[in-house]
Amino acid sequence: MVEGAAGLRSIPDLLKRNVAEFGGAPAYREKEYGIWQSWTWSETAEEIEALALGLLNLGVNEGDFIAIIGRNRPTLYWSMVAAQMVGAVPVPLYQDAVAEEMEYVLGHCGARFVIAADQEQVDKVIEIQDDLHQFEHMIYVDPRGLRKYDHSALHQFDHVQTQGRAARDEFLPELDRRRTGLGYDDTCVMLYTSGTTGKPKGVVLSNRNIVEAAKSSAEFDHLKRSDEVLAYLPMAWVGDFIFSIGQAYWKGFCVNCPESADTLMTDLREIAPSYYFAPPRIFETQLTQIMIRMEDASPLKQRMFKHFMAHARKVGPRILDGKPVGALDRMKYRLGEFLVYGPLKNAMGFSRVRVGYTAGEAIGPEIFDFYRSLGINLKQLYGQTEASVFITVQPDGEVRSDTVGVPAPGVEIRIGDSGEVYYRSPGTFVEYYKNPESTADTKDPEGWVATGDAGFIEEDSGHLRIIDRAKDVGKMADGALFAPKYVENKLKFYPNILEAVVFGAGRDRCCAFLNIDLSAVGNWAERNNIAYASYQELAQHPQVLETLQAHVEEVNESIAQDEMLSGCQVHRFLVLHKELDADDGELTRTRKVRRKVIGEKFEDLVTALYDGSESVYTETEVTYEDDRKGKIKATLAVRDAKTWPVAQAKVAAE
C-alpha cells in the first residue's frame, strides 16, 4: 500500500491527526439565528464518528455512493467525511439544481443514500425517486416541514447519529476496519462537471489527488492553522471541496458557514477571512455594489474616492508586490488607506485577507487590478475539476492580470500543436465514472490531460496565458483571431453589464448579446426618477441603450489596440429581454455561458444582428421559480456600435 504524506492517506486520517495535535482548536463555525456556533476538532470528530456509525446501522456498504445536497453547513461537510470513513463515496450536488438535473446525477452514480439539508431538497428527491431504482434511504438535517412525511425511508440526521452512538459497541470494530483500510488510491469524492457541452461527467478523485493537491497548494501560499475561510460556494464545486475540506483538514484551519445567502455579506464582514476565494462573478458583483453606493455618495466623497483610487491604481499593486515606490507616493497611499481603502475593504469583509484567489473563468483585468490596488493580495489560479483544482498559480511578486501564473507545485504543462493546454500532476483525476471513452479522449496513457483551453507559455517569464476555450477560439471570415471570452470580460467590467455573449466565428464581424445588471441599472433609474415595470422594460429604455452603446464603443477602442484580437470589436449588439439563467439551460450551475445553447435558442436574434435589422420581435420560453413554464414576448432594439481602425486606436492611445 502506498503511503501518503507522513502516513496520512485520507481525509479521515487527517481528522485523526488534527484531533491528536490540536483537538481543542476551532474546526467549524456556523451562524444560526444570528449567533455563531463553534465546534472544535475533537467535537467535529465525535459528530462525524456518530454519523458514520449511524450509516453503518442503515446498511451503507463499502463502495456505495452517498449524494449530499444543500447549502454550506457543518453537518453536510461532516457527512462527506463520514461517508469516506465508512468506505462510501460522497457525491455533492448543486443545491439550486432542479429535480430533473438531480435525477441524472443520482441515476448515473446509482446513489443508494441521500443526505439532504432541508424540505426543499427532500421534495426534489421525492419527486424523482420512482425513477431512481437504487435509491433506498434519505437523511435530512432540518426537520421543519417534514413531520408528516412518510418516514419509512426518511430519517432525521440527529436520529441517525443517536442510533449510531447507541450501537457504538456493535459497529465500532467494523468502522475501524473500514477507516484504517482506506488507501491512498481509493476514491475520495466524485464531483460532476458543469456540463457546458452536454451531460455532466462524474470526475473520480482519489485520496492521493486531494491530499497531494491540498498539501502542495497550502505550502505554496504559506497557509496557517490560524487562517479563517468562509464556505459559501456550491459544495458540488471542486473549489469548495479543496478549500473547505482538502486544505482545511491538511492545515487545520477553521471553516465558517454563513447563515444564508441573504446574510452572506454581513457574515463575511464579521468573520473577515484571511484566506478567501471567489469566482469572478462575486468580485464583479461586489464592485458593482461599490459603484452604486458611490453614485449615492456626496460630491465630496465622490471626488475623494476618485482621487485616491486613481493614486491606488498607479502605486497600489507595486507596493503590494514589494517594488520600489517613492516616499511621497507611499505617504499619499497611507493617507488613502486611512480615508478610502481601509473603510472600503472593511465594508467588503476584506480587511484581513492575506491570500485571495479567483478562478472558474477569466476575470476582467480592470476588475482584478481594482482589488489589488486596494492592497488585497488577489491572485488568479487556473484549474479544473479534473486537476483537483490546481494547474497554475501566481507566486507573490509575480501577479499579473494578463496571465494565470506558473505551473503549480508538482504540475507539468505543455502546449499542443493546436495551441491547446495539456497538464499532468499528482492531482490528475482517476477517470470519468462509467465513461471510458471520455476518459481516454481527455487523459492519455502517460497521464497528460487535455484542458480544452487554448493558450501559450511566455518565453521570458514562464507564465501561462489563456486565450479562451479551445472550442470557442476560432477565425473570422477574414482569418482574424476570434476569442469571445476576452471581449466578454472587458464588457462585464462595467457595473451596468451583468453578462455578455459574443458571436463571430466564421463571420465578417462580431456581434453581442448583453444582460443588464438589474441592481445597478435599477439604482440609476431610481436616482433619475425613471419608472419601469419589469426587467424587460428597463433593458430597452433608450437611455440605458445609449449608456451600453458607450460601454461597447469604449471596449472596441481598447480591443483595437491589440493587433492579434482587434478583429473582435463588437459591431452590433442587443440587450436581451431576460437574464440568462441556469434553470433555462443557458448557463451552467457554476454560471458559465453555454454559448452553443444560447446561439441555437436565440437563433432569430443572432440572425437580426447580422441581417441589418433595426429591431426584432421574439418569444422565449422561461422557467419560473416554482418550475412552471411561461413565455416572454418582446421587441428588441438592435444597435450599431462604432469600431476603431487599429492604427487610429494606437495613435489615440499615444
Image (cartoon, grey):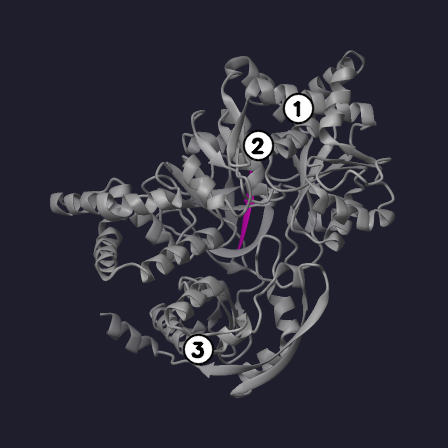
Compared with 446, 361 (above or below) is: below
User: How far apart are labels 2 and 1 at the CA level?
Assistant: 13 Å
Q: Residue furthest left?
A: 328
Q: Is 389 placed left or right of 334 in the picture?
A: right
Task: Give the number of the disc on residue 150.
Answer: none
Task: Give the number of the disc on residue 545.
Answer: 3
Q: Is residue 424 magenta?
A: yes
User: How far apart are labels 2 and 3 at the CA level?
Assistant: 45 Å
**Residue annotated with mark 2:** 245
Q: Secondary structure at mark 3?
A: helix
Quadrant of the frame with the C terminus = bottom left
- Viewer-proximal residue, 412 or 545? 545
Q: Identify residue type, mark 1.
A: Ile
Quadrant of the frame with the N terminus = top right
Q: Find the magenta span and give its range.
A: 420-425
N-terminal label among 3 and 1: 1
Image quadrant where residue 327 sits: top left
| Residue drawn at x 46%, y 62% as measured from the top left | 519
Compared with 301, 141 (above or below) is: above
**Residue annotated with mark 1:** 48
| Residue drawn at x 25%, y 46% as measured from the top left | 318
